[in-house]
Image (spheres, helix red, strand yellow):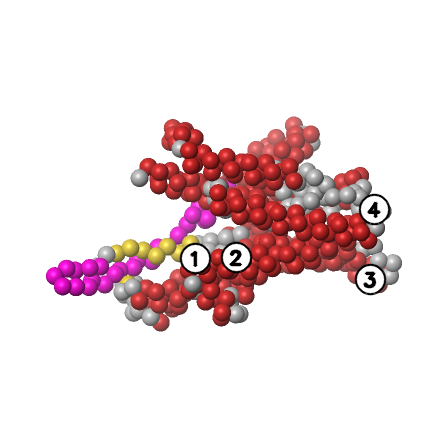
Amino acid sequence: MENFLNKIKLIWTDTVLRKRVLFVIFALVVFRLLSAIPIPGIDTLELSRFLSNNQFFGILNIFSGGGLSNLSIIMLGVGPYITGSIIMQLLTIMVPALKRIYHEEGEAGRKRFTQYSRLITIPLAAIQGFSLLAILESQKILVNLTPFNRITNLIIVISGSILLMWIGELMTEFGIGNGVSLIIFAGIVSRLPSEISQLIFTFDVSQIPLYLMFIAAGALVIAGVVVVTEAERPIPVTYAKRVRGAKMYGGGSTYLPLRVNQAGVIPIIFALSLLLFPQMIGNFLSSSGNATVASVAKVLASFSQTSTLYAVLYFILVFLFTYFYTAVTFDPEALATNLQKNGAFIPGIRPGVSTSAYISKVLSRITLLGAVFLGFIAVLPLIVRSLTGITAIALGGTALLIVVSVVLDLIKKVDAQISMREY
């Protein structure tokens, strides 16, 4: 506790750190204010009824920072930007030119890569915004809209998403931590007061043992997320000794850390996007006058989180996407080549192809643990809901992983800034 208080004191006494922290707080306040500004033409009673009975939009509302609950100008959140970044990362495995830009051109290449992600965000925001507004209008939530009103609303939500992307990048540049992650974190945390108040209003004395078990399970899950998120498999690396003139260089030993959860939260986002797609189509077609189309829409909409098939497919997709995303973002062959160029080798393993095969083997084994863990965390809220009837958003899934990951990353960034100032 004393160490924590000393860090707080160092942050507020250091001018640069204080400005960075205050900028992040200011940006988050602006984000929350924007999420309270609604677009025109909303039937608020119909909106609240629709959100309370629709799990699909309930999940989207969490990751829009609560902006969807009142159809704010930033209802899309940073979803289009994240989708654009994911598409660009996937393209690196199919387009060699993009792979060279991202992996070989250093900081300049990553800036170009980020710029491409920004450009992709605009059409993605247009597509997502148009689809979302069309669904809401078909559900009689947006009423009495003229063609001009529809175009205006679409421009507003696209601009809101781009504005939020810009705010996130400003937070990254002038604040502490990753701005986009902090925006998602703030959106998730902003839901906690309403969740807690709902739990208080429905409090039942006879359920106290269940609540205590629920809190204990939540603490265990958070501890597990922290352990697995921070877990690493070190691979020893030795640098060969080189003699230049009368001096000897190299000969040191270090280790190569391979993270157990190499893919982070991305596999869950991929899987969730695929599983929510049938529900989106079902909601879009539900108002159709055609009997066949309406029956298809009903079947698609029934594929919800309450079904066992949904939970099984969710786990399998998260498991597969963990391996896929790890293969996309981590290149053992390039790593082995870099080690060989720098005169480094893994003891007992020949440089080159053998090193690449060894790293791939180790990575495959630890990714198995990470994939199973991510799959368990993803379906945990569904298991809790089926056993207790309590909707526990904060207990597992993407929300918990994002919150824990952002907090851990923020702590590391603050520690790094403090250490730099001390030196």
| Magenta residues (range) | 221-250
Specify which label sits upstream in the sequence, 1 or 2. Answer: 1
- Is residue 222 shown in magenta? yes
Element at label 3: helix
The residue shown at (30%, 58%) is 236
SS at mark 4?
Answer: loop
* Residue linked to disc 4: 143
> Which badge, 3 or 4, comes first in the chain's sequence?
4
Distance Cα–Cα, label 4 vs label 1: 48 Å
Kindly identify the amino acid type of the residue bearing the numbered disc 2.
Answer: Thr
Residue at image mark 3: 293
Residue 344 in sight here: yes
Which part of the image, by quadrant, shows the N terminus?
top left
Residue 196 in the magenta stretch? The answer is: no
Task: Name the residue located 47 percent from the left edge and 38 percent from the top edge.
Answer: 20
- Residue 93 position, x and y percent, is 51, 67
Spatial CA span between label 3 and label 4: 23 Å
Q: Amino acid at mark 1?
A: Glu
Tag of residue 107: 1
What amino acid is labelled 4 in the image?
Val
Residue located at (74% from left, 49% from top): 153
Q: Position of residue 111 (x, y in %)?
A: 48, 57
- Residue 85 image offset from top left, x and y in percent: 55, 57
Which residue is under mark 2?
A: 114
Nearer mark to the viewer, of 4 and 1: 1
